[in-house]
Image (cartoon, rainbow, N blue to C red):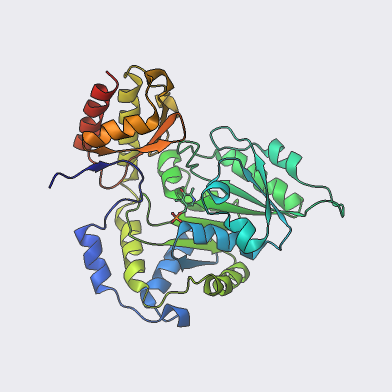
């Protein structure tokens, strides 16, 4: 069977043989009773990495974000975030449905907000207005092209939030990538947030799982809502073992994904009809525009599929590629060969 090169997302990775071995060997218990030793180990490990009191294992990044929104807000509160953020666009309207919040969306630069924008969006206290309660930031920013949040912006926004009695949640689905690219540790980012969500199932290559980290009081609320949302799992240690393995073995290699993404971007910049600035590719996501090629993203995706490469058509003009654990240097070369034929 011819294997496809799958660049649609970093969620498509399959557990490695060594990861499966770690999963098979995992000690387990009933995590709803707090008795799964492997889940407990993972939670302590991630709390330590993020410098928070506690962390809690949940099934998905979406649930991690939405539990955080739920635990920080009351119905009718307003959540300030960026226009193209995941929590607003790609989570099925959960903020409105599950927490009854409304969103104030600000236009970012490749997903990044400036403190003055956030300041301008905070409502004065007045019975007419919703209560500005929470700011959500996303690092790296997915739709922004894997952009890394400058620590200056994050720290300034956090300090502003504290001065105005707002909370800050950091959607760190790819915080590991941000750290690998910038050298700023996950804990250094996390200190500027009341809560942080991180994914194990993206670049780290685990099959399932995310965590939320924060203060003990906050995690106690998340724990209750996790049960309410249906995210309490039983012998989840089999999944947690994959996460522990990934944190021990797959953090260092994220830089390789970034190098490969850069290589793809440089190659694409030489294809006629492709618009891309390789200088903007900071991590493992490559977004480019195909308007000038006269082809639609769907047509390009179809042509690439014919050559054994899966890519993600993003809206009417753009394509997204994401590098990950299962993409090698040879795959990158083959992909660029295929693009050269398609954009000839
Ligand atoms: C993927 C992603 C999520 C959600 O993760 P799922 O596990 O797919 O629910 C949240 N935020 C960002 C920025 C993501 O890229």
Query: Which quadrant of the view contains residue 133?
Result: bottom right
Q: Residue 225 appears in which quarter of the rendering? A: bottom right
User: Is residue 274 left or right of 165 when viewed as pictured?
Assistant: left
Q: Determine whether, in the image, residue 202 is placed left or right of residue 149.
A: left
In the rendered view, would you say 84 is above or below 21? Answer: above
Identify whether 304 is placed above or below 267: below
Task: Find residue 287 and report its horizontal and vertical position in percent.
Answer: 42, 32
Res. 262 in view? no
Residue at the left extreme, as displayed: 1
Residue at 43 percent of width and 22 percent of height: 291
Name the spot of residue 61 as percent of width and height, x first.
Answer: 47, 57
Q: Residue at x 55, y 47 (%)?
A: 89
Q: Residue at x 87, y 55 (%)?
A: 127
Residue 108 in view, yes or no: yes
The picture quadrant where one finds residue 321 is top left
Residue 268's x, y, as percent? 33, 24
Position of residue 96 measured from the top left corner of the image (x, y, whole percent): 64, 57
For the point 23% across and 28% down, which residue is it? 338
Residue 340 or 158: which is nearer the viewer? 340
On the rendered image, what quadrant is the C terminus found in? top left
């Amino acid at each position: 069977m011819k294997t496809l090169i799958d660049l649609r997302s970093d969620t498509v990775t399959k557990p490695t043989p060594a990861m499966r071995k770690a999963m098979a060997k995992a000690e387990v218990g009933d995590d709803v009773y707090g008795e799964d030793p492997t889940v407990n180990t993972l939670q302590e490990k991630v709390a330590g990495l993020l410098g928070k009191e506690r962390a809690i294992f949940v099934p998905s990044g979406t649930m991690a974000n939405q539990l955080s929104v739920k635990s920080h807000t009351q119905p009718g509160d307003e959540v300030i975030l960026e226009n193209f953020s995941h929590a607003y666009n790609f989570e099925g309207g959960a903020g409105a449905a599950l927490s009854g919040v409304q969103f104030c969306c600000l236009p970012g630069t490749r997903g990044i907000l400036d403190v003055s924008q956030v300041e301008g969006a905070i409502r004065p206290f007045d019975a007419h207005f919703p209560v500005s309660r929470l700011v959500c930031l996303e690092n790296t920013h997915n739709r922004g092209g894997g952009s890394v949040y400058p620590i200056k912006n994050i720290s300034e926004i956090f300090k502003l939030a504290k001065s105005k009695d707002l909370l800050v949640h950091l959607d760190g689905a790819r915080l590991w990538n941000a750290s690998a690219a910038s050298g700023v540790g996950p804990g250094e980012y996390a200190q500027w947030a009341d809560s942080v969500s991180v994914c194990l199932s993206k670049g780290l290559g685990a099959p399932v799982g995310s965590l939320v980290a924060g203060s003990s009081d906050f995690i106690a609320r998340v724990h209750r809502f996790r049960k309410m949302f249906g995210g309490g799992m039983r012998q989840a240690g089999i999944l947690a073992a994959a996460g522990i393995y990934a944190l021990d073995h797959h953090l260092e290699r994220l830089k390789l994904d970034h190098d490969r993404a850069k290589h793809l971007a440089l190659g694409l910049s030489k294809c006629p009809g492709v618009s891309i600035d390789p200088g903007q590719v900071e991590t493992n996501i490559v977004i480019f525009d195909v308007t000038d090629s006269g082809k639609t993203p769907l047509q390009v995706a179809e042509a690439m599929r014919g050559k054994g490469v899966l890519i993600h058509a993003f809206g009417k003009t753009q394509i997204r590629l994401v590098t990950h654990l299962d993409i090698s240097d040879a795959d990158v070369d083959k992909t660029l060969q295929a693009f050269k034929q398609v954009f000839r």
